């Protein structure tokens, strides 16, 4: 574990003198954490670690973890802290996290945040975590989530803002578009309640720690990415002082 997480002495290929380090993308369901994590991954060559994606992959492959998580994920209820902490611990041991990583959808409870803080403080030379919270208003999130459609190879659409040419069919490969079971309005309402009760305090936790910025996510994707990249530079510069 001690060798895999960001050391100050390594250099970044994307931007020689910039080390992203551990980055938390925080925010409600649908704010665009996944989209922005992928953009940062491309910009800095560091991995996106999405606990939701790892859980969905396990469900699809019928693993023991997937069987334990399926009903909870389908209902929009949180999976236990122990399970997700272990998943993240295993993922952070991979060598591709050495220059940094983007956590997307984790931590989602104060227990997970305490676990992550303790885990990273045990890593020699690790840069401090920086938190970026993406903010989008409720009605907009409702449309983003309930309108979301995906094909089996991951091309994504939105019935409100980015419809496919033929309804229900992927423009790229002609495969059927499906809605994630947890993207229904009823489950969205549950996920928002869970977010307010359990994850909003996590955002406050990182806000109080100081290495934290808030970003307006109700703008074109590229503008949000530019905003996050600027935040990241400021936060890393400030954390060196
Ligand atoms: P997401 O794709 O991040 O919206 O996550 C989808 C679902 O996976 C959530 O509604 C939860 O059921 C589960 N999940 C993802 N991340 C976590 C986490 N950090 N803690 C607990 N459950 C999670």
Image (cartoon, rainbow, N blue to C red):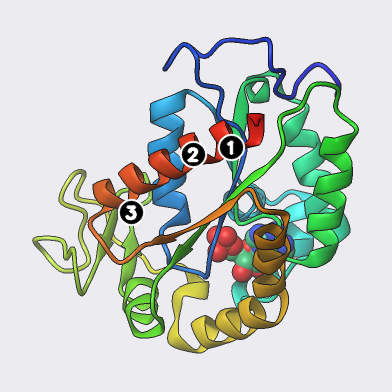
> Which numbered disc flags the more N-terminal residue, 2 or 3?
3
Q: Residue at x 15, y 61 (%)?
A: 164
Residue 57 point in image, percent of width and height: 60, 48
Which residue corresponds to mark 1? 238
Regarding ligand 1, which quadrant of the image does it lie in?
bottom right
In the image, 120 versus 209, the foreground residue is 209
Residue 157 point in image, percent of width and height: 26, 60
Q: Residue at x 62, y 86 (%)?
A: 193
What is the spatial separation of the Cα atoms under label 1 and label 3, in whole angstroms? 42 Å
Q: Report the side of 76 relative to 141 (left or right).
A: right
Q: Looking at the rendered structure, which numbered label has been put on residue 37?
A: none
Mark 2 crowdedness (10 Å alpha carbons): few <14, some 14-19, many ≥20: some
Q: Residue at x 31, y 43 (%)?
A: 226
Q: Residue at x 72, y 75 (%)?
A: 198
What is the spatial separation of the Cα atoms under label 2 and label 3, in whole angstroms? 37 Å
Which residue corresponds to mark 3? 151
Res 221 visible: yes
Residue 165 point in image, percent of width and height: 9, 61
Q: Report the side of 172 relative to 128 (left or right).
A: left
Question: Which quadrant holds residue 121?
Answer: top right
Which residue corresponds to mark 2? 234
Pointer 1 with pointer 2, Cβ within 8 A: yes
> Which numbered disc flags the more N-terminal residue, 1 or 3?
3
Label 1: which secondary element: helix
48 lies above or below 208: above
Residue 169 point in image, percent of width and height: 20, 60
């Amino acid at each position: 574990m001690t060798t895999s997480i960001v050391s100050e002495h390594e250099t970044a290929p994307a931007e020689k003198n910039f080390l992203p380090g551990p980055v938390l993308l925080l925010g409600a369901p649908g704010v665009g954490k996944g989209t922005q994590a992928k953009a940062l991954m491309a910009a800095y060559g560091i991995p996106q670690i999405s606990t939701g994606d790892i859980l969905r992959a396990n469900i699809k492959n019928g693993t023991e973890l997937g069987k334990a998580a399926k009903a909870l994920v389908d209902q929009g209820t949180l999976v236990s802290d122990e399970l997700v902490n272990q998943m993240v611990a295993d993922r952070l041991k991979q060598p591709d996290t050495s220059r940094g990583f983007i956590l997307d959808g984790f931590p989602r409870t104060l227990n997970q945040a305490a676990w992550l803080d303790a885990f990273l403080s045990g890593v020699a030379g690790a840069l401090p975590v920086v938190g970026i919270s993406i903010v989008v208003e409720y009605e907009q999130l409702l449309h983003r989530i309930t309108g979301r459609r995906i094909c089996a190879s991951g091309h994504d659409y939105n019935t409100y803002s980015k419809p496919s040419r033929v309804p229900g069919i992927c423009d790229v490969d002609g495969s059927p578009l499906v809605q994630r079971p947890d993207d229904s309005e009823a489950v969205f309402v549950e996920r928002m309640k869970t977010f307010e009760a359990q994850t909003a305090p996590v955002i406050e936790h990182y806000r109080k720690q100081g290495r934290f910025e808030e970003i307006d996510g109700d703008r074109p994707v590229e503008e949000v990415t530019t905003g996050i990249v600027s935040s990241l530079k400021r936060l890393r510069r400030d954390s060196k002082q």
